[in-house]
Amino acid sequence: MDRVVRLKELLQENPEDSFARYGLAMEYAKQGSLEAALAEFQALIARDADYVAVYFQAGQTLEKLQRVDEACQMYRQGIEVAARLGDAHSRSELQEALDFLE
């Protein structure tokens, strides 16, 4: 079965499933459907702002869409969340991505 279809089914069963929404966004990104991926990343942030990995991937997607200012803002937001949660590794990755753009 197509992974996108299966992930959509999982989200219909449980719209709060952050892992499934992240997986769907990643599948869209992998297929080159960047706007769809970004929409899912943004939906995930709206539902589960502490899902730290989403900020890096959303930033990368924004970069691919050549929306650099928005990517920087996404990285900054992720840095704040990672710092609040004490996730030094994610904070470092996000800071590195931000530094590269600035």
Image: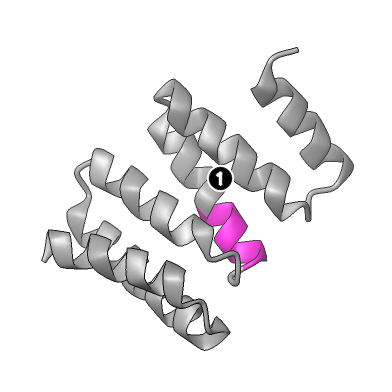
Q: Is residue 61 left or right of residue 17?
A: left
Residue 73, given in percent of the width and then of the height, sits at: 30, 68
Tell me how the rendering is colored: one colour
- Locate residue 49, reporting x and y percent: 58, 70
**Image position of 89 (left or right of 5):** left
16 over 23 or under it: above or below? below
Determine the residue positioned at 40% across, 57% down. Answer: 56
Q: Residue at x 45, y 27 (%)?
A: 30
> Residue 3, percent across and down?
68, 22
**Residue nearer the viewer, 30 or 9:** 30
Front-lying residue, 22 or 66: 22
Name which quarter of the figure residue 92 lies in: bottom left
| Residue 19 as seen in the image, left or right of residue 77 | right
Q: Which residue is mark 1?
A: 40
Residue situated furthest front in the rendering: 89
Question: In the image, which residues are magenta?
Answer: 42-48
Query: Is the N terminus in the top left, top right, bottom left or bottom right quadrant?
Result: top right
Residue in the picture at 17% in, 67% down: 99
Front residue of this view, candidates 70 and 88: 88
Which quarter of the figure is the C terminus placed in? bottom left
| Rendered location of residue 24, percent (x, y) | 62, 36
What SS does tag 1 mark? helix
Identify the main secondary structure in magenta.
helix
How busy is the neighbourhood of tag 1: few (under 14 within 10 Å), some, or many (20 plus)? many
Q: Single out the residue that lies furthest toward the top.
A: 1
Task: Name the quadrant containing residue 68.
Answer: bottom left
Image point (51%, 55%), residue name:
42
- Hey, what amino acid is under mark 1? Glu
Compared with residue 15, is residue 72 higher up or lower down, i.e. above or below? Answer: below
Quarter of the rendering containing residue 90: bottom left
